[in-house]
Amino acid sequence: MASRPQARKIRQNLSIGGRRTSLSLEAAVWETLTEICRIEEKSLDELCDSIVRDAAGRVSMASALRLRALGYFREAGAASPSGG
């Protein structure tokens, strides 16, 4: 049986909603959010603040960030002519 990949978590300090907070997310999620920041030309604080604000209490902060990281490139792929 294949072993599960390690989901190493990293804790980051962020400013969300004008308040400092600390979130622990998987390294791959932080890497994806950082790539989105590069594409969108936003800081990590700006991106995370807008994601959490858009989630408006429907899910936790961590879940909102994970879902956005997952959905961003899926949406981009669906929007491209070769994306299906």
Image (cartoon, grey):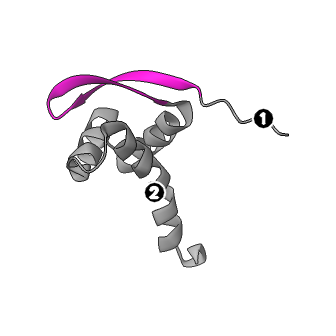
Residue under label 1, please give it: 3
- Residue 72 percent across, percent down from the top left: 44, 56
In-image side of 25 versus 18 (left or right): right
Marks 2/1: CA–CA distance: 26 Å
- Residue at (54% x, 30% y) in the render: 27
In percent of width and height, residue 65 lies at: 38, 43
Along the viewing direction, whichever of 84 and 35 lies nearer the viewer: 84
Residue hosting label 2: 71
- Up the image or down, 68 lies above or below 81; here it is above
Residue lying furthest front in this view?
A: 1
Q: Residue at x 47, y 34 (%)?
A: 30
Crowding at mark 2 (Cα within 10 Å: few <14, some 14-19, many 20+): few
Q: Secondary structure at mark 1?
A: loop
Magenta stretch containing residue 17, yes or no? Answer: yes
Residue 41, position as x, y percentages in the image? 34, 45
Identified at 45% across, 57% down, the residue is 71
| Farthest left residue in view | 18
Q: Magenta segment range?
A: 8-25
Amino acid type of disc 1? Ser
Quarter of the picture holding the N terminus: top right
**Mark seen at residue 55:** none
Q: Is residue 30 above or below residue 11?
A: below
Residue drawn at point x = 57 percent, y = 73 percent: 83
Is residue 24 highlighted in magenta?
A: yes
Left or right of 6 on screen, residue 10: left
Label 2 sits on a secondary structure element that is helix
Q: Which quadrant: the C terminus?
A: bottom right
Type of amino acid under label 2: Gly
Of callouts 2 and 1, the N-terminal one: 1
Residue 6 falls in image quadrant: top right
Give x and y (percent) for residue 2.
Answer: 82, 39
Question: Which is more toward the observer, 83 or 51?
Answer: 51
